[in-house]
């Protein structure tokens, strides 16, 4: 099981690069002007040699220089002592995620999208483009000028094949989804639906389209990450076929 978890943790690092990264004794320090927890945290990626206390202090100095909180991602592949040490040093848990996985059915129609509202249609692109990004920013209400500048470069840095899906209503993007292909997996990211169109099947249609297109391109399995207390999203993902595999959380401290 640990090897399966490590594989998915590696896939997720490939799928979502940070604006800036530093490798340090089996850890990777990620920085993106606090755009998301995942892209602004310390993650374990290999074996460590140095004492944990010294390493934590080093990371705090780096994030202080970056002028953002110091965040550590704790997963089942992390050093078991790390979570305890962080709590002892005053780090609080701020964000929990569940990682869900599924095998993609071989029969194409099983993964075909459900019917959309009559005034909506699905658009598919092989790469994230400017229109898709503008739609994502609108759906997430992103207005931080630094994020608007650096996030496009983060998406452009994704080193894997992509499937960018959007739902258009009257020519405007009303929902987004992104699939990242890596090995025999497709990672599901950026599922967002405009508030007034939620509960109308758009997210499910996007999910099924991503799974179907991913299967056509060789993916046999899928994974995604969902905020632990987002019950509505987890119900949707289970309906499509995802099951919970493991949990992660982020410990954070102002430094």
Image (cartoon, grey):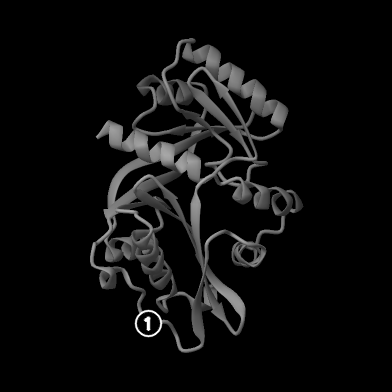
Q: Is residue 72 visible?
A: yes
Q: Quadrant of the N terminus?
A: top left
- Tell me what residue is drawn at x 65 percent, y 67 percent: 131
Q: Nearer the viewer, residue 205 or 184?
A: 184
Viewer-nearest residue: 20 or 82: 20
Where does the C terminus fall, quadrant-wise?
A: top right
Name above or below for residue 173 compared with residue 18: below
- Give me the residue at 51% from left, 29% from top: 91
Vertical side of 41 occupied by 85: above or below: above
Q: Say above or below: 52 vs 28.
A: above
Give the residue displayed 51% in from the left and 14% down from the top.
Answer: 53
Residue 216 placement (x, y as % from top left): 35, 62
Task: Choose between 32 and 131: the one closer to the eye.
Answer: 131
Q: How many marks?
A: 1
Q: Position of residue 86 (x, y in %)?
A: 48, 24
Residue assigned mark 1:
115
Where is residue 101? Give x, y as percent.
Answer: 31, 51
The answer to which quarter of the image holds residue 31 is top right
State left or right for residue 38 relative to residue 156.
left
Q: Position of residue 164 (x, y in %)?
A: 52, 62
Q: Residue furthest front?
A: 217
Q: Is residue 187 rendered to the left or right of residue 146?
A: left
| Element under disc 1 | loop
């Amino acid at each position: 099981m640990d090897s399966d978890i490590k594989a998915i943790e590696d896939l997720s690092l490939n799928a979502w690069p940070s604006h800036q990264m530093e490798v340090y004794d089996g850890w990777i320090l990620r920085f993106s002007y606090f755009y998301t927890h995942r892209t602004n945290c310390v993650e374990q990626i290999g074996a460590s040699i140095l004492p944990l206390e010294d390493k934590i202090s080093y990371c705090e100095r780096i994030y202080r220089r970056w002028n953002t909180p110091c965040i550590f991602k704790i997963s089942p592949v992390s050093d078991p002592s790390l979570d305890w040490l962080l709590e002892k040093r005053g780090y609080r848990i701020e964000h929990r995620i569940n990682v869900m996985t599924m095998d993609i059915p071989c029969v194409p129609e099983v993964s075909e999208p459900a019917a959309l509202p009559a005034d909506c249609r699905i658009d598919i692109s092989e790469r994230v483009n400017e229109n898709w990004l503008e739609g994502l920013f609108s759906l997430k209400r992103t207005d931080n000028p630094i994020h608007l500048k650096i996030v496009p470069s983060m998406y452009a840095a994704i080193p894997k094949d992509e499937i960018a899906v959007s739902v258009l209503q009257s020519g405007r993007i009303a929902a987004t989804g992104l699939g990242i292909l890596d090995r025999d997996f497709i990672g599901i990211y950026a599922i967002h639906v405009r508030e007034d169109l939620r509960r109308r099947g758009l997210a499910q249609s996007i999910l099924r389209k991503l799974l179907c297109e991913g299967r056509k391109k060789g993916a046999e399995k899928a994974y995604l990450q969902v905020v632990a207390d987002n019950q509505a999203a987890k119900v949707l993902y289970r309906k499509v076929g995802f099951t919970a595999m493991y949990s992660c959380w982020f410990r954070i401290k102002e430094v």
